[in-house]
Image (tube, grey):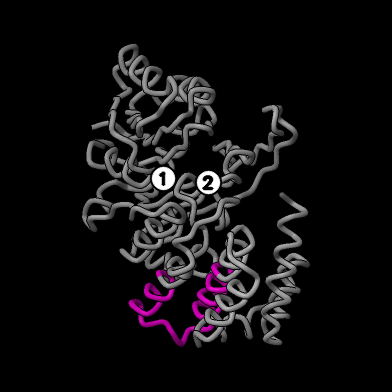
Amino acid sequence: MPRISFILPVYNMEAYLPRVLRSLRAQTLPDFEAILVNDGSRDRSGELCAQAATEDSRFRFIDQPNSGVAAARNAALDAARGEYLFFLDPDDWIETDAAEILYHTAREADADLVLFGVFHDYYNAEGQLLRTTADPPPLPEGVYRGEPCKQQFDKLASSYLVITKLFRRACVERAGLRFPCRQLGEDGLFYTAFCRTNPACVAAVRRPLYHYTIARKASLSNSYHPERLQDNFYLSNAVWDTVAAWGLLESPKHLQKARFCTVRDLQMGIKNLALSPLTTAQRTAWLREALRDPRVRQAVQHAPLRHLKVNDKVKLLLCRLHLYRAVVLLSSVNQHRNG
């Protein structure tokens, strides 16, 4: 059994694949498998994946029609044999000792989930690296046992990205977890479902081990998603459902975090409106209807403002005053300025 299964969904990543493949071949932990799923790419990504599998037996190649990142990851999950799972995007890359550090941390702690720090690499339109920042994991470095996801919920709940975590595959398979087929937020739903399985041990490594490419990641969240008009709060609803399943709806820190996730979904919905072809009247009507939901309304009323960016703070204050048209107009101006 390989110690780690790297899972890479690949779609039109010809320019980036050589870098991530080099970072995998250079791993100081040699006992791994890398499952490359070509999701109907129209460039040479499929050829590069097939070539990697031919040259190195640790690389496995799956070719499928374009079905989206969730379906690609699920295909890899079905094929995975590793003790732990590492989800890696093909436009990112990892430090050469990432697998070794994470695997030994997981084994020494007998951890079901390992969190780690991440580098954010900012590139311009020409692909030049502008700057790099580093963020620690949501928990201080250490080992957390018992009911860590419940106890540390206020820190863990909104850390949606699966690429900054190592998962024990047995936990994923025991719960039958797979990625729901959504264009946005499928990783958050997977991670929230994993937390709901009540892992017995979570470990955190402060050191950044993953290089996250900002320029490309921003593109999907800056696109209009019409499906969000009907179902905007699916991520925060999953958080609320988890808190309810734990019987902790009266816990102040759990309630506060669930409300924070609701406000974040609302902010995503407002941004989506600004990217939409809807009229100002239609956007205003959507926002007014969203604020009729008692959960959304209470989240907006109780959301702390001190840590928010100025624009987000102003929008929340306007929502509290029921000035929905003003929110829509402000968001449209901001989007035009940033676009």
Identify the residue at image location x=46%, y=22%. Answer: 21
Q: Residues within 10 Å of mark 2 (few under 14, many from 20)?
A: many
Q: Position of residue 230 (x, y in %)?
A: 44, 69
Q: Could you tell whether 119 is left or right of 290 in the image?
A: right
Looking at the image, which residue is at 39% across and 43% down? 69
Does 46 lie within the magenta span? no
Q: Where does residue 85 sit, x and y in percent of width and height?
A: 35, 41
Q: Secondary structure at mark 2?
A: strand
Residue at image mark 2: 116
Asked if marks 2 and 1 touch (Cβ < 8 Å), the reply is yes
**Residue range (magenta):** 238-265
Question: Quick check: 56 left or right of 306?
Answer: left
Q: Is residue 143 above or below residue 79?
A: below
> Does residue 188 sit above or below 218 in this rendering?
below
Mark 1, secondary structure of its residue:
strand
What kind of residue is marked 1?
Answer: Leu
**Residue under the image location 71 percent in, 49 percent down:** 339
Q: Mark 2 or 1 closer to N-term?
A: 2
x and y percentages locating residue 61 in the rendered image: 30, 25
Q: Pinpoint residue 274: horizontal percent, then vertical percent.
A: 64, 62
Q: Quadrant of residue 59?
A: top left
Residue 263 shown left or right of residue 179 in the figure: right
Q: Of the numbered discs in the image, which one, if any, rests on residue 166?
A: 1
Magenta: main secondary structure: helix
Q: Amino acid at mark 2?
A: Phe
